[in-house]
Image: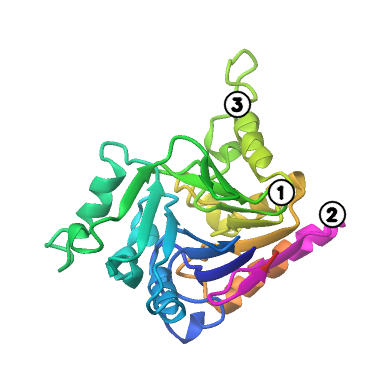
Amino acid sequence: MRVKFWGTRGSIATPGPATLKYGGNTSCVEVRAHNHIIVFDSGTGIHNLGIQLQKEFPSEPITVHVFISHTHWDHIQGFPFFLPAYKRQNRIIVYGPPGRDKTLRQIMRMQMDSDYFPVALGDMNPTIEIVEIDAPIRIGDISISHFYLNHPAMSLGYRVSDETRSVVYATDNEPYQYTLPPPQKADKRAGLSEYLDDKLIEFLDGTDLYIGEAQYTLDEYKAKLGWGHSPVESIVEFSLRAKVKRLALFHHDPYHDDAFVDGMVRHAQELLAAQKSTIECFGAKEGMEVVL
């Protein structure tokens, strides 16, 4: 199983000399497993992935499974520039959650309305399939399960597994411990925040690689409560409790340059070391490949 990062930035693309190390493209991660091509999110990073796939498969038909975590711009805005989706011999399957009042197909089509983009969704490969997820997905020997995250949109985390190795992609999540009001003694919600966070930890349990959003420092997070993102301390805590093997800090804030992200990675590593953890922690970098 090979994992490659094509876009690691959150919110908005941030090209420039200050982001060369970790990259400026928005969310896109490729997983190759048992010859299947699985893609998580179609931020601006999917453009370069598409170029690479064209070079790798210049005439051979391919099937690409694209899993959308949620439909905020930084997770779908690259799809109109994904070149394999214009070739009729290719099979492109897009999976994801529906919107609050629109289907996934409607949302994907709307961003390619003629007022925003010169090519309509229907003018790409007309056989593009769009699947709203309501059950685990099976792709050959690969299983992909999902988990609802805490974000101001219908947002899913995904776990891809071949029963030997697994990767969890769970970006844009805010811990419930910070967002639910503290329960009173007689409150039926007592323990609800812990329960909900524990369910995510169960989803992460023992994974070989956890790609987790750690957009803020704890000080930054205090001013952004309810925005749907995590402080790095929470990602470290979840990783420790879930006993993951590797942790990739992901969805870097557009206001964080490379030096700032370096500092966040060091902080996470120090927190892990203080617990004598063997978890390998690193900052996700555009172009980085991890082999499991």
Q: Which residue is mark 3?
A: 192
Q: Quadrant of residue 220?
A: bottom right
Mark 2 vs mark 1, CA separation in Å:
10 Å
Find residue 105 and report its horizontal and vertical position in percent: 27, 47
**Relative depth, front residue between 128 and 30:** 128
Q: Secondary structure at mark 2?
A: loop
Mark 3 vs mark 2, CA separation in Å:
26 Å
Find residue 188 and report its horizontal and vertical position in percent: 58, 15
Q: Residue at x 40, y 48 (%)?
A: 95
The answer to whether residue 255 is left or right of residue 183 is left
Which amino acid, mark 1? Glu
Residue lying farthest top? Answer: 186
Q: Which residue is mark 2?
A: 275
| First in sequence: mark 3 vs mark 2 | 3
Does the residue at mark 2 contact the one at mark 1 (Cβ under 8 Å)? no
Residue lying farthest left? Answer: 115
Q: Which residue is mark 1?
A: 237
Find residue 32 and report its horizontal and vertical position in percent: 57, 64
Residue lying farthest bottom? Answer: 17
| First in sequence: mark 2 vs mark 1 | 1
Which amino acid, mark 3? Leu
Q: In the rendered structure, which segment of residues is drawn in magenta?
A: 269-290
Q: Is residue 287 magenta?
A: yes
Q: Secondary structure at mark 3?
A: helix
**Relative depth, front residue between 96 and 226:** 96
Q: Residues within 10 Å of mark 1 (few under 14, many from 20)?
A: some
Mark 1 vs mark 3, CA separation in Å:
18 Å
| First in sequence: mark 1 vs mark 3 | 3
